[in-house]
């Protein structure tokens, strides 16, 4: 006999998370709820004298299948919107009605039968399962092996992308960057040559002028950059008067960070 | 408590899974509904195995799990292939294929 507490625990662990399939908006939340359902079903298997199947359920479903689902969700983008326009009119209500009818039908069928419960249950330990698996069902076992290989090859074929165009080498990419007039070299990191390596402070060129390109474009749009003038002043003090001539034009270029940058975004 | 009560639970889970397959447009969510239906069938098999006192039902549930694993691999590969060509995993859009 089954412990009633076990049954109600399993029911509470499976049915409310399963309802998220119908009502939850985000696919990741649904995937996590289904993981909970799988754990609840594994509990039920252990309670129904099938400990081997309980462990397999945890390993195969929560460990492999649902993680594969989450992985594919990551690939296709978590924020895939679901369009709620109905192509068939009233499809949602017809579907809910049909599914509810199916549930009531199944329950009424089960309620009509009375099955005598075996008084000598066989615990589904791995050795017992293996004995049946490799004697009575050995042919099915081999067919399933062929099925698994076919599925693996099918997935490989399905996700394989033939290369339509020749591969771009690094040299070609660099040449095309020069052709469109973008800066052929990497931009300096923010803070480079300056006395500060914060992200919002532009790098200084050898003359001591700030390089606006070195600061992230996002910070520029949000007006969160600094012109680095105080750090440049420190640099001049340390280096002496030899660097004194360029800073006359420096304030202009420092203010100029808001101008639309021609090289921005082209060479990427 | 009778093990048959788990069969009722399996029927409820199967109905929820079928409702999800019929209503949701997101291919991955509908696919999770299919998984839930397979698991409900597994639960029924295991409870019948307990009722009859034999392990054959558990072996069948094991086979269902293997087939479900293979099915998930191929199904998700199809979803990714469709997403690559159409940038969408909505189940309604491939309906435009019909002439």
Image (cartoon, coloured by chain):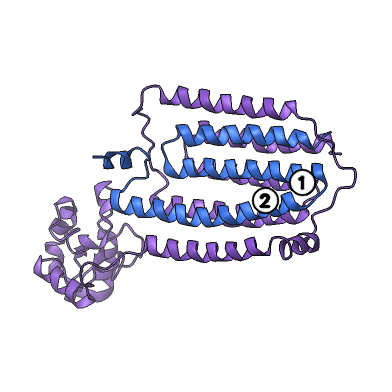
- Circle 1 crowding by C-alpha within 10 Å: few under 14, some 14–19, many from 20: many
> What element does badge 1 sit on?
helix
Left or right: A149 as drawn, with respect to A123: left
Residue A200 place in picture, x, y as percent: 32, 57
**Which disc number belongs to residue B96?**
none
Q: Residue at x 56, y 56 (%)?
A: B69
Q: Return the residue at label 1.
A: B49
Image location of residue A234, percent across then percent down: 29, 67
- 10 Å neighbourhood of mark 2: few (<14), some, or many (≥20)? many
Determine the chain carrying the residue at label 1: B
Decide if residue A152 is on the left or right side of residue A143.
left
Residue at horizontal 15 percent and vertical 56 percent from the top: A261
Report helix, strand or loop for mark 2: helix
Circle 2/circle 1 CB separation < 8 Å? yes
Task: Residue B99 in the image: state x and y as whole percent.
Answer: 23, 40
Q: Is residue A44 visible?
A: no
**Chain letter of the residue beneath label 2 in the structure image:** B
Query: Quick check: do tags 2 and 1 share a chain?
Result: yes
Q: Earlier in the sequence, mark 2 or mark 1?
A: 1
Residue for point 72% across, 65% down: A134
Query: Chain B drawn in what color?
Result: blue
Q: Quadrant of residue A18?
A: top right
Residue that lies at the very extreme toward the right in this rendered image: A119
Name the residue carrying label 2.
Answer: B61
Q: CA distance from mark 2 to mark 1?
A: 10 Å
Colour that chain A carries in the picture: purple
Horizontally, residue A72 falls left or right of residue A208, namely right
Q: Is residue A206 above or below residue A125?
A: below
- Residue B84 in view of the camera: yes
Task: Pinpoint residue B61: horizontal percent, then vertical percent.
Answer: 67, 50
């Amino acid at each position: 006999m089954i412990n009633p507490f076990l049954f109600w625990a399993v029911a509470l662990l499976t049915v409310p998370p399963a309802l998220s399939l119908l009502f939850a908006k985000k696919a990741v939340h649904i995937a996590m709820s289904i993981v909970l359902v799988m754990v609840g079903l594994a509990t039920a298997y252990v309670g129904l004298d099938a400990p081997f199947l309980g462990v397999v359920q945890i390993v195969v479903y929560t460990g492999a299948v649902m993680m594969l689902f989450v992985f594919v969700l990551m690939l296709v983008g978590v924020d895939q919107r679901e369009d709620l326009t109905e192509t068939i009119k009233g499809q949602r209500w017809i579907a809910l009605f049909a599914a509810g009818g199916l549930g009531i039908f199944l329950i009424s069928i089960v309620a009509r039968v009375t099955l005598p419960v075996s008084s000598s249950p066989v615990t589904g330990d791995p050795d017992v399962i293996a004995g049946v698996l490799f004697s009575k069902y050995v042919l099915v076992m081999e067919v399933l092996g062929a099925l698994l290989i076919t599925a693996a090859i099918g997935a490989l074929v399905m996700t394989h992308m033939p290369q339509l165009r020749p591969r771009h080498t690094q040299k070609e990419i660099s040449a095309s960057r020069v052709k469109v007039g973008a800066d052929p070299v990497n931009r300096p990191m923010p803070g480079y040559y300056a006395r500060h390596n914060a992200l919002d402070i532009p790098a200084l060129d050898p003359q001591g002028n700030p390089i606006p390109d070195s600061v992230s474009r996002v910070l520029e749009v949000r007006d969160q950059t600094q012109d680095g003038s105080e750090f440049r002043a420190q640099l001049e003090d340390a280096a002496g008067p030899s660097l004194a001539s360029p800073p006359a034009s420096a304030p202009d270029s420092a203010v100029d960070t808001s101008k639309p940058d021609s090289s921005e975004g082209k060479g990427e | 408590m009778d093990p048959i009560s788990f069969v009722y639970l399996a029927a409820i889970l199967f109905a929820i899974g079928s409702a999800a397959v019929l209503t949701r447009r997101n291919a991955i969510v509908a696919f999770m509904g299919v998984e839930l239906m397979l698991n409900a069938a597994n639960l029924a098999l295991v409870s019948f195995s307990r009722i009859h006192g034999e392990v054959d039902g558990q072996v069948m549930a094991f086979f269902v799990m293997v087939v479900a694993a293979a099915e998930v691999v191929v199904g998700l590969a199809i979803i990714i292939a469709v997403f690559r060509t159409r940038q969408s995993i909505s189940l309604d859009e491939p309906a435009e294929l019909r002439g």
